Structure formats: structure tokens, C-alpha cells
Image (cartoon, rainbow, N blue to C red):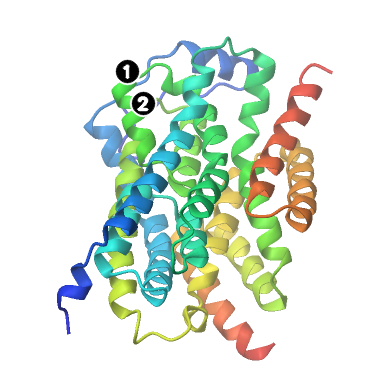
Amino acid sequence: MQDDSETSDREPTTASGSDERAEASHAPVTFNRRGIRAGLLTCVPVAVGVAGYGVAFGVLASQVGLSVAEAALMSALVVAGASQIIAVELWADPIPVTAIVVTTFAINLRYSLMGAALQPWFRRLSAPQAYGSLFLMADENWALTMRDFRAGNRRGAFLLGSGIAIWLFWVGSTVVGALAGETIGDPAQYGFDFVLAAVFVALAAELWEGRSTLLPWVVSLGTAITAAEFLPGRWYILLGGFAAALLEVIRHDR
Amino acid sequence: MIGESVLALEPIVVGVILAMAVVTYATKTGGLWLVNRIEVSDRLEAGLSVLPGAIVIAILGPELAAGGPAEWGAAGLVLIVMWRTESILLALGTGVAAVVLLRGLF
């Protein structure tokens, strides 16, 4: 769980924010088995939480008529929990293909922001390393990776390693949920529906950086709650993130 | 029990899954692809740096707002356990157990 044994890639952290940014742009970024291992081990507890959500997805998928193989294939290839659950909610006969694909795109647009946020480190990697790793990017392992980078580490393979942990648990738990689909009643009965919220509360606790974080978070929260009221789908996630980033860009050298 | 239906792959369903996979991969790579092609100023980088927390909050806010006392109480417990133990697994376990118990109460 703790990655303290992986100290060789760790670089001294600096006190000031501008030094940290300069360091981020010039220090080398590694991409090796050690980084994969660190990411995988760090992410296992989170992946266990994701598995609770995967079981819920599997159950939902089997209830709308997807076979176990189809549910597993979706988890293996799409690797984006929220959009998969919403796609399954939209599922009907005949399948509303356009609605499902467009909604998936909209829900997952937030990944563009998240991928862009990795750029100070990922531009140091080769294209296959960077774009290959991004296939396995999910909310949870992205947040863990950002935390690792910001702690001063330069392990470029951390996203891939943590993504492998997520992928294994996500696909495995989907199969379990889909197989159990007919026998399990309501996933909420076991609290599975709360797993995702709990994961994000835990991540928020880790991403808190003190009082400078407060204003962007308040702006994001207010924007997201307002947008969730008036807009369909999960546009509010994108808008909340954008609003906070915009605030930061405006107040950068006020 | 485990028969052919478990392994069934309908072409149209596989097609929808592939389309979902393609658009999702496009969103995952699109942001990095774009910022690799434009000059990123300190100012833009400052904006990008608040994204992790801001997106987590944007996902969480409406979800918790739509919940009730059981979800809020359980979320508070997750926060306390994270703060005290820094163990994600312990925090998640506590949260899920708490939400089941609290839903029984409320």
C-alpha cells in the first residue's frame, strides 16, 4: 500500500510553488517496471472500492439483458465507470445507438481535462508510453497519479500501473456482478451504490492542499450543483472543473 | 446454469461497445494531444493544477446533494477515517457499512 520503499525515483520536494513548477518542467520522468509496480500497489485499495461499483454495473447490465461476455467486454474496452452505468440505464430495444455514444462522449469529456493536467510530466514520455497509459486512465488512478507527481515523484509509469489495478478489479467485478445479476436484488441494499461517492470523499481528503484550495473548490462545487440542476447528463463535472481552472487562470498573478 | 447465453456476443451490442470505446479513448487522449501542440504558460498551468481537486468536488457535490442524512453522515465518516488513518480501504469500508446502517435508521 505505502510506496515508501520506492524512494529511488523520488526527488527532493521544494518549498515554493514556482520552483516546483520549474522542477516539473525540467526534471526527467522515468517509465519503468518500478513505476508500474508502485502504481499498481498504491491503487489496489482504491481498486477494491472500484470493484464494489463494478459489481453494481454488472448487475445493472445483466438486468437490461446484456450477457456476461458483453458486460465484461464493455468494462475491458471502455474503462469508464460512470459512462458505462449511464449507457446501461439508456439501454432499450432497439438500442438507442446515437444517444448512447453521444452521452458516453459527453460524460467522458472531463477526461480531456484530466489528460491535459498530466501534460507537465507526460510530455517527457514517448507517444506510445503516454497514449498507451491513457487508455487505462480512470478518475481514481488519475487522482492517485497526480498526487504522486505532485509529491515530487517522476514515475511516468504510475498511471499505467494504477490503471492495471483498476482494470483487473473493474473487469473481474463486472463478471461477478453480471453472473450474480439474477440472484442479487437491489445493489443499494448492500451499500454498493455509495462506493463511488466514498472513493471521491477519500480522494478529496488527499487532494486538499490547505487554504489556497478552498476558493477553487467552492467555485467548482457551486458551479457543479447549479449545472446539475439545469443541464442533462454529467456536463456539470466538466463545467465545475472549468470554472475552478478559469478562476485560477484569472487570479494567477493578480 | 452457465451456458451459451453467458458468452453470447450480439454483433449490434459489440458495435455499440466498440463505438463507446473509441469515443472514450478520444476523450482520454484529446486533452494531452492538444496541450502538447500549444505553448503552456505558467498561467494556464496554474489553472490545470487546480483541476484534480476541482473535478473531484464537481463529481461529489451534486451526488451528495442528491443524497440524504445517511449519505451525508457516511461521507463525513469517510472524511474522518481518511483524516485519522490515511487508509483508503478502511475509509471505504467504514463508509459503505455506515451508509447501510444509517439508511436503516433514516
Q: Is residue A116 visible?
A: yes
Q: Chain of mark 2?
A: A
Q: Report, in whole angstroms, how far the alpha carbon at label 2 lies from the one at label 1.
A: 6 Å
Residue A223 located left or right of residue B13: right
Residue at the (44%, 42%) spot, across then down: B24
Give A156 or B10, whichever is nearer the viewer: B10
Residue A116 at x, y percent in the picture: 53, 27
Q: Quadrant of the C terminus of chain A?
A: top right
- Which residue is rendered at x = 42% and y = 73% of the image? A64
Numbered badge on residue A130: 2
Q: Which residue is mark 1?
A: A126
Q: Residue at left 34%, top 73%? A: A177
Q: Position of residue A175 (x, y in %)?
A: 28, 67
Q: Tags 2 and 1 in contact by the CB under 8 Å rule?
A: yes
Q: Amino acid at mark 1?
A: Ser
Query: As drawn, is A113 to the left or to the right of A232?
Result: left
Up-down: is B68 above or below A183? above
